[in-house]
Amino acid sequence: MAEETYTNRPKGDPYAGALRPVAQTKAPKLAFKAGGREYRVDLRNKFGPVIDQGELNSCTCCATVAAVEYLFAKREGKWLMMSPLFVYYNARKISGMEMTNAPILAAHAPAALLAWGVCDDDHWPYDLNRFNTPPPNEAYRNATVLQAVQFARLGSIDEIKASLSAGIPAMFGSNIPRGYYEAAERTGLMPELGKASGPPSGHAMLIVGYDDGARHWIVRNSVGERFGEKGYLRIPYSLFDSHVWNEDVWAIGELEKIGQRTLIDGTVSGAVDDFQRNGAAQTQSAM
C-alpha cells in the first residue's frame, strides 16, 4: 500500500484505521489461571458517549481512550472526556506517520498513551482539521501518564473472557467485510459468518462484554451513536473467530489489580520502548 499524504482535508474509511502486523510485536501476554469466567458480561454502563472518528483512521486510539475513560469512571465515580486526537498524533509519531491520516498498528495506540499520556478533550478537541497539527505544549502539560494503566496481549478466547470478567475491556484488530458493518448499523447485530460480504476493512474496536447463551461479543465501535445500539454492536462468535487478528487482541486497564493472572513474555515498559524504537519499521512492513 502506498503512503498517501494529506494536507488539511482528511480522507478515510469509517470502518478502517488498523494495520495488521506482519510479525508478532514484542509485548507481554496476559495469562490467567483456570476459573473466573462469567457466563455473561456487559460493561457498557460505565462508558461515556461513543465518539465518531469521522474520516480519520483513528479507530485504535478511539478504542484505547474509551478503555481509559472507562477506568477513570470506575475509579473516580465520574466520566471525563479524553482526547483521542492527542493519542492519535503520538501513536503516529511512533509509526513515523505524524503528518498523514494513516492507519496504525493497534498496539501503537496504548504504547503512545503510556509514553505521552492523554489530555482531556477540552485541551485538544476532536477537530478533523487538526489531525496533522502537533498538540500544543499546554495539552502535553495537561496530559496524565496513567501509571496504573497497562496493556498486554490476550492469546485466546478464554483469556478475553477472563479479562472481561475481571472488568478489563479488550481492543482488537480485524478485517471484517463491510457488509457486516452495514447490517449492524441498522440492527445492532452482525450476521453470522457467511451471511454478508463486501471488501474487508482493517478496523479496531473495543470488546466490552459477551454472552455465552446468545454466542456473541458486545463491542463498542467509533462511528457515533447512530450506529447500531447507540454506537455498540454484537458480533457472533463464528464471525469473530474467522476475521479477528488473533495476535492483535489487547487488554487495556489496571492489569496489576486482577487476581489469578500473570504477565509473561516481557514487560509493558519494554514493549513501549521497543515500539518507540522500531514502530516506523513495523508500520512500513505492515503497509
Image (cartoon, helix red, strand yellow):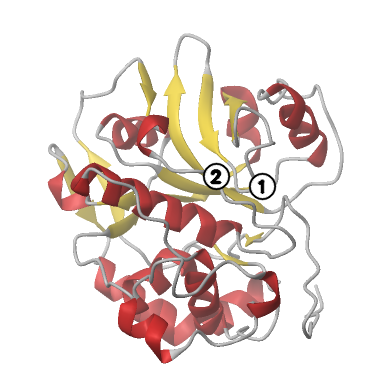
What residue do we see at 46% from left, 63% from top?
Answer: 107
- Whether residue 251 is visible to the viewer of this picture, yes or no, is no
Please tell me whether mark 1 sits on a helix, a strand or a loop: loop
Q: Residue at x 56, y 78 (%)?
A: 92
Per the image, the residue denoted by label 2 is: 50
Which quarter of the figure has residue 105? bottom right
> How many C-alpha atoms fall within 10 Å of the one at disc 2: few (<14), some, or many (≥20)?
many
Residue position for label 1 = 223
- Pick the front one: 183 or 131: 131
Q: Is residue 112 above or below residue 93?
A: above
Does 29 sit left or right of 111 as displayed?
left
Residue at left offset 66%, top offset 23% = 189
Q: Quadrant of residue 3?
A: bottom right
Residue nearest the viewer, comparing 131 with 33: 131
Q: Position of residue 230 (x, y in %)?
A: 60, 32
Task: Report helix, strand or loop for mark 2.
Answer: loop
Q: Amino acid at mark 2?
A: Val
Residue at the image point whose x is 51% and y is 28% from the top: 218
Where 126 sits versus 263, above or below? below
Disc 1 residue type (three-letter): Val
Q: Is residue 64 visible?
A: yes
Residue occupying the far right of the picture: 198
Between 166 and 200, which is closer to the camera in this rendering? 166
Would you say the residues marked 2 and 1 are in contact, meaning their CB atoms lie under 8 Å apart?
Answer: yes
Would you place residue 138 above or below residue 31 in this image?
below
